[in-house]
Amino acid sequence: MQPYEERLTAPRSWWFVAALAGLAMGVILLPFGPLPMLGGLVGGAALAAVVVSSYGSVRVRVVADSLVAGDARIPVAALGEAQVLDAPEAAAWRTHKADPRAFMLLRGYIPTALRIEVTDPADPTPYLYVSTRDPRRLAAALDAARAAG
């Protein structure tokens, strides 16, 4: 089986924005003195860094006979055909082509994705939309897991 694991980390520019949020908090608290300003700077930056880190810590993995996408664990046997989505097609499936019943592991800063049909008749979810930087490799890993299982 071809292993696959990816962490959907936030882009570097988001870390810059987190630092700016800390700076803004420091400036907001500047009228109260240097100590509150320093506390606001450190606290604001730390809080913004926690938010960026947690949003960018989601993982996509193919483990044994399952696809693990964020908190969801879906057996490969319940999945059908995988469609590799380039940037324009992924944007279409995020917006006007999207089905509200679909499972979407969506990260807007990742332009490509994989759309995977759900074949389990007991599951009302029509498909999974999984943001990934390497959709072809994820599709190959799913095919390999399906063949091994």
Image: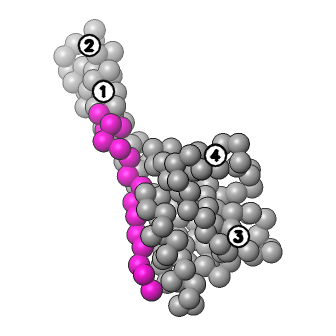
Mark 1 vs 2: CB contact within 8 A: no
Q: Is residue 115 above or below residue 100?
A: below
Residue 91 drawn at (x, y percent): 58, 45
The reply, left or right, for residue 56 in relation to residue 117 is: left
* Residue type pointed to by label 2: Leu
- The tag earlier along the polypeptide, 2 or 4, is 2
Numbered label attached to residue 30: 2
Say which residue appears at 70% left-offset and 49% top-offset.
Answer: 98
Provide the residue span drawn in magenta: 1-16
For label 4, the residue is 92
Q: Give residue 22's quadrant in the image.
A: top left
Residue 130 drawn at (x, y percent): 55, 59
* Residue type pointed to by label 3: Val
Front position among marks 1 and 3: 3
Q: Is residue 135 above or below residue 95?
A: below
Numbered label attached to residue 118: 3
Say whether residue 45 is visible.
no
- Magenta stretch contains residue 3: yes
Q: Can you name the residue that lies furthest to the top here? A: 31
Mark 4 vs 1: CB contact within 8 A: no
For label 1, the residue is 20
* Residue type pointed to by label 4: Ala
Q: Is residue 146 above or below residue 132?
A: below
State how far apart marks 2 and 4 are (Cα): 45 Å
State how far apart marks 4 and 3 are (Cα): 19 Å
- The tag earlier along the polypeptide, 4 or 3, is 4
- The tag earlier along the polypeptide, 3 or 2, is 2
Which of the pair 140/28 is nearer the observer? 140
Say which residue appears at 19% left-offset and 16% top-offset.
Answer: 34
Q: Give residue 6's quadrant in the image.
A: bottom left
Mark 3 vs 2: CB contact within 8 A: no
- Magenta stretch contains residue 103: no
